[in-house]
Amino acid sequence: MRDAGFKHWDCITPFPVHGLDKAMGVKRSIVPRFSLAGGILGFCTGMSLIWWTGAVDYPLIVGGKPYFSPMFAFPVAYELTILFTAFATIGGMFFLNGLPKHYHPVLKYDQIKRGMDDLFFIVIESRDPRFHATNTRTLLEKAGGTQIQELEA
Amino acid sequence: MAHAESAGPAPAILQEVKPAVLPRATLVENNRSFAWITEKICSIIEGKTPTWWWVCFIVACFVASFTVAGITYLVAVGVGVWGHANPVNWAWDIVNFVFWIGIGHAGTLISAILCLLRQRWRTSINRAAEAMTIFAVVCAAIFPVFHVGRVWYAWYLFPIPNSNVIWQNFRSPLEWDVFAVSTYGTVSVLFWYVGLIPDLAVLRDRFFAAGNKLRSFLYGLFALGWRGSNRHWSNYEMAYLILAGVSTPLVLSVHTIVSFDFAVSLLPGWHTTIFPPYFVAGAIFSGFGMVLTLMLPLRAIYKLEDLITQYHIDCMCKITLATGTIVGYAYAMEFFIAWYGANPYEGFAFINRAFGHYAWAYWIMIACNVITPQFFWFKKVRENTAFVWILSIFVNVGMWFERFVIIVTSLARDFLPSSWGYYSPSIVEIFTFFGTFGVFSVLFLLFIRFLPIMPMAELKAVTPQADVHAGHDHH
């Protein structure tokens, strides 16, 4: 499929298949960029929160300690780094995947249950410029496909 | 190097090193198919509610009502109903808090650290262990929230602008703890939920095919339109890996910060630098004790022997053994430093722990935490499921006593002999703590009834037939 030049196509698998990304030509995921941004934001939030509340908004001496020090601010900033990274990672993953999605034609296929269970599907979308009703069908048959069906969007 | 071969003695440097190829343990036995796994896990949810479940659920609700009663009385009357009095102003509340938080740690360890270390045996136990983490954090949170006394002011713990215009004291380890525990709870829920999404999609489609529209809708609501697309899996796996990556420093930091509650103080017996690693090891030890306590009955009830194999039990027992021995080492090292540090107060605190008024608690702790896990050296013991289960209970008991010993003995005998005291819990504290086991069981029973107890997608990926290289090593 990749060699035939399709762009809008996909595989439906019950679990992540080792090596399928390479076979499909899917590039390395860019989720880590979201995570990094979230982590930096979290750390800065923690440090600035403690600095602003303790040294700017209401300076108060407790136990003769300084108004602000990155030392005692570190545990909270560290935890917020992790918290924001986790949210950014999951948010980024959903954003890149276009989820949550209320409707997708694949889910209307009466055998989709098996695609989540023990069968493996290939989906080619008709908006692909190389899509052609009969030629694509032949291509899928040549690739060893069985049960080829057209689904309405 | 070619001429070296003809010379008599073997060359000192090998031309190449061939590491021995060790057979990998099978993680799913009897060569089960993908469909078998789906059917096995889903049938637990789709089948009729078993009678034992209702019995356990009702008993658990009854036990949980003790916490409700204890807390209601506390809120109505005040914190004075707990047995706290000078000098022991911190006792069962913090003991129970640390106990429950510690139990949660094994879940995160299994899901995060073992994921990064590519220990694939984690797959069949990680879902239930993560659920255990979340429910344990829920039980733990009850204590600090209610020990503030006027519980309706508990939100003062968070930096929310309030009418007093004053902010939290971020120099205090107790405030660090607020952030550590709330982050831990949140990230654990997120991690668990992300893992659940593909399995919820399976349930959605199965209930739809079976004509159960309502349940299909509910599972579908939380499956967020997951459709098993490989482009999605690619992002999903990356996100999962990063979550594992951030959960690892998280789990280590949470118990470190919990130990700061004590280590940052000046009290003899608390003010020690060994606390962070010692607490983390203890937490993992107690957590694995609890994982064994929960998983062995589940395995027997649902006949999951093909998915939780003897190999899995062996691994869990060995981790319990390793962490238990680390904990034993920490006990010994504390004593050594108390003597070597030549601080009379520190020395007294430890002599007092082992031979003072609370010596009974100290020796229960040693027996349960240091001696019990040593049985796991023996294969015969690890293969005897019933015996492993009993030992796991001892581990749980021992770790509760560890926190009791640390907290109460140090407070009861502080610097001034005139203020020494002896602490015993009040009935309200006993009720509250006893009931948390019910709270935990109620949540866990609901989990096994309505959610897949094992990650189906991950299990399928570790079956022999999912390996595209047909069992050959491929690194």
Image (spheres, coloured by chain):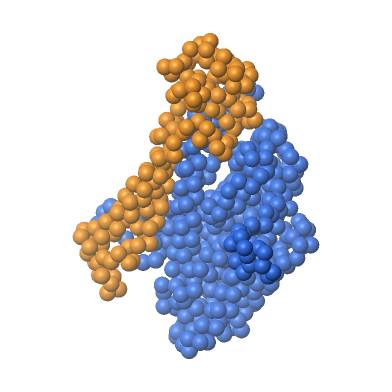
x, y percentage for residue A14? 59, 32
Q: In screen coordinates, is B383 left or right of A118?
A: right
* Foreground of the two, B360 or B23: B23
* Foreground of the two, B456 or B303: B456
Hue of chain A? orange
Residue B196 sits in quarter: top right
Q: In the image, what residue occupies the spot 44% across and 64% down?
A: B257
Hue of chain B? blue
* Foreground of the two, A104 or B461: B461
* Foreground of the two, B456 or B17: B17
Q: In the image, what residue occupies the spot 71% across and 35% down?
A: B33
Q: In the image, what residue occupies the spot 30% across and 73% down?
A: A63
Q: In screen coordinates, is A58 left or right of B42?
A: left
x, y percentage for residue B418? 46, 86
Say how many tags the image has. Answer: 0
Residue B472 sits in quarter: top right
Q: In screen coordinates, is B269 left or right of B126?
A: left
Does the image show residue B244? yes
x, y percentage for residue B405? 57, 74
x, y percentage for residue B228? 54, 31
Q: In the image, what residue occupies the spot 30% across and 54% down?
A: A44
